[in-house]
Image (cartoon, rainbow, N blue to C red):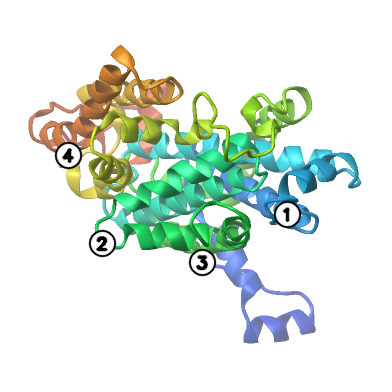
Amino acid sequence: MSGSSTWTPKSALGRWFESRLPIGGLVHSSFIAYPTPRNLNYMWTFGAILSFMLGAQILTGVVLAMHYVPDSKLAFTSVDLIRRDVNWGWLIQKLHANGASMFFIAVYLHIARGIYYGSYKGPREVLWLLGVIIFLLMMATGFMGYVLPWGQMSGWGATVITSLFSAIPVVGDTIVTWLWGGYAVGSPTLNRFFSLHYLLPFMIAGVVVLHIWALHVVGQNNPTGVDIKSPKDSVAFTPYATLKDATGIAFFLLLYMYFVFYIPDYLGDPENYNTFNPAQTPAEIVPEWYFLPFYAILRSIPNKLLGVIMMFGAIAMLALMPWLDTSKVRSAVYRPVFKWVFFIFVAVCLGLGWVGSQPPEGMLLVAGRVLTFFYFAFFIIALPLLGLFEETKPVPASIADAILAKSGSGDAVPASNA
């Protein structure tokens, strides 16, 4: 789907280099001449926003790694010294800490957009699976990064979450011992987590390249869910999509900078400003906000092993969406029942996030179990059945027809009701 490149270097040296390694032509065909659906809205800017945030996290992370000490006796102090003694260290640390939350805000909106508009449907299954892999790597990176400051919540979070692997039959205890580097969290744990936290963002970058490659092979989805069929359905990526992406990044940066400069500690836990004390357990051990829905699912299941399976199963359901959804219509714009089911699903996820932040007792425990049921019901019950029984609206024959119908300057020609 990449546009055919007509770019030719002007200099003799440029033409010589291009004939041996055509990077310029690749960039031109992929990011300038690439045909983009002309009806994309600003929900399609989150891919660019996520790429920007990944770059920001890698850059600030590399600088922080120069000053951080992965030792149980020095880690907390080294983070404090970064804030106080390193030139602009306070800014770099806050950019990195809040950048993790901004990253997850953008990725959750990116996933929600993909579900709403059916971006997981064929021929984009591999593209979607690569996105789920990126999400898993992000979660692993975020968890390990949260442990590194070695505050009270970091240390106990590491203890609780890594202990979950002990529920795995036969090899569980061995996995936990390897993660800890001993029989309790300590300096070996920090060394392992620091190494992996430094490595994983570069792995994410590699999968992102594959993700973009897969996107350019099958082409972008769009609000109608109809593929590009003629030149009138598309525009060149640059300047149209480029300017839209730049606008989306600019507005997202305003939110990001608001948190960094005005409420830099709002998304953190006050307990984490005390150094880790293995002899004093916090009143309530809670992970970062972006893990709370999955944490709520884990705590809602009485059996430890089943809870771990359900927690990872919640992510596996995302990977299986291309095969669970039986509807032939991609976009929720033309699926009136699915549209309401989608918003109920979003409410369920938000409810799980709130339940995960509260003590697991009384009616909250019941609420967690009910919300967990509805979470899995969306994938296992709603997606297969809606495709069989839902009455969908007529889908336009092309993107251009959908735009003309919306503007009132022409009549759309339905492609199908299925």
Instruction: Pick whichever of labels 2 and 3 is earlier in the sequence.
Output: 3
On screen, residue 24 versus residue 377, left or right, reads right
Most extreme residue toward the top, as rendered? Answer: 363
Whether pointer 1 and pointer 3 mark residues with C-beta atoms closer than 8 Å, the reply is no
Most extreme residue toward the left, as rendered? Answer: 389
Q: Quadrant of residue 266?
A: top right
Residue under numbered circle 4:
327
Q: Quadrant of residue 387?
A: top left
Viewer-proximal residue, 62 or 331?
62
Tell me, yes or no, if residue 398 can be seen here.
yes
Q: Residue at x 54, y 51 (%)?
A: 185
Please tell me whether mark 2 sits on a helix, a strand or a loop.
loop
Please tell me whether mark 3 sits on a helix, a strand or a loop.
loop
Residue under numbered circle 2:
170
Residue under numbered circle 3:
4
What's the mark number on residue 59? 1
Q: Is residue 137 above or below residue 263?
A: below
How far separated are the C-alphas under marks 2 and 1?
40 Å
Q: Residue at x 65, y 33 (%)?
A: 272
Which is more foreground, mark 1 or mark 3?
1
